[in-house]
Amino acid sequence: MSTETNEQTQSERILLAANTCISTRGYANVSMRDIADEAGVALSQLNYYFKNKEGLFKEVVRMMISKYLKEIEASLKQENSPRKRAKGLIHYFKNMLQHNPELFRLLYDFTGLAIWSPVFSSLLSELFKELSDMIEKYIFKDLQLKELKGYSTKTLSRLILGSMFGTGIQVLLDQDEELPEALNAMQILFE
């Protein structure tokens, strides 16, 4: 039993080290050796647990996706009206950009990879679909169709999600500026 716990701990330590390395230096600038050093394990242990670099990074993406989905759903569940949920979601994104930009950097890095890799493409596509579905479920499901001005709830969910992630890229690229007013302006849509 202790061997199983030790293995789990070592594989988790490798995943956390990979997450740290990639989110601080970027995918292209991180080697398997860097991750092994960060985790304090032999390089062979990375291959033992994850087969190869793609397998390891696939697990890092899964870990990131799980974290995003849990946090965002918790944020949406805190409020009881669609408008308050939308404002809470925008607040969540602003807070993450200010206090945990590494998570966004990691997401954007893997999104770039997803454009060229079918493995990462399906993972990230599923993330964006689930996020869009959450927005649709928690923000738009109770609104009257006349309030949506003829657009489908799916279209509006994707628009909100795309706007927030696009604004996030701008924030990360323009680090000397305060948060763009775009996220604040989005809140006006829900008043």
Image (spheres, rainbow, N blue to C red):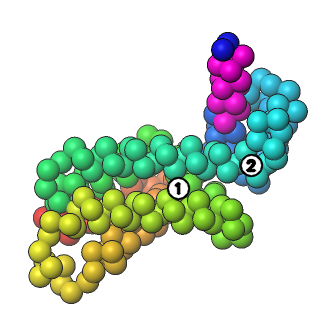
Q: Amino acid at mark 2?
A: Gly
Q: Residue at x 24, y 47 (%)?
A: 77
Residue 96 location (% of width, % of height): 42, 46
Q: Quadrant of the C terminus?
A: bottom left
Q: Quadrant of the N terminus?
A: top right
Q: Which residues are magenta?
A: 3-15
Query: Marks 2 and 1, how far apart in space?
Result: 27 Å
Q: Residue at x 54, y 66 (%)?
A: 125
Q: Amino acid at mark 1?
A: Leu
Residue 105 location (% of width, % of height): 57, 52
Q: Nearer the viewer, residue 130 or 93?
A: 130
The residue lying furthest to the bottom in this view is 150
Residue, disc 1: 172
Of labels 2 and 1, the one closer to you: 2
The residue lying furthest to the top in this view is 2
Residue 144 location (% of width, % of height): 11, 74
Residue 15 location (% of width, % of height): 66, 36
Q: Residues within 10 Å of mark 2 (few under 14, many from 20)?
A: some
Q: Is residue 23 magenta?
A: no
Q: Nearer the viewer, residue 149 or 45?
A: 45
Q: Nearer the viewer, residue 167 or 6?
A: 6
In this rendering, position of residue 128 left or right of residue 49: left
Q: Residue at x 36, y 49 (%)?
A: 72
The answer to whether any part of residue 107 appears in the image is: yes
In which quarter of the view is residue 190 placed? bottom left
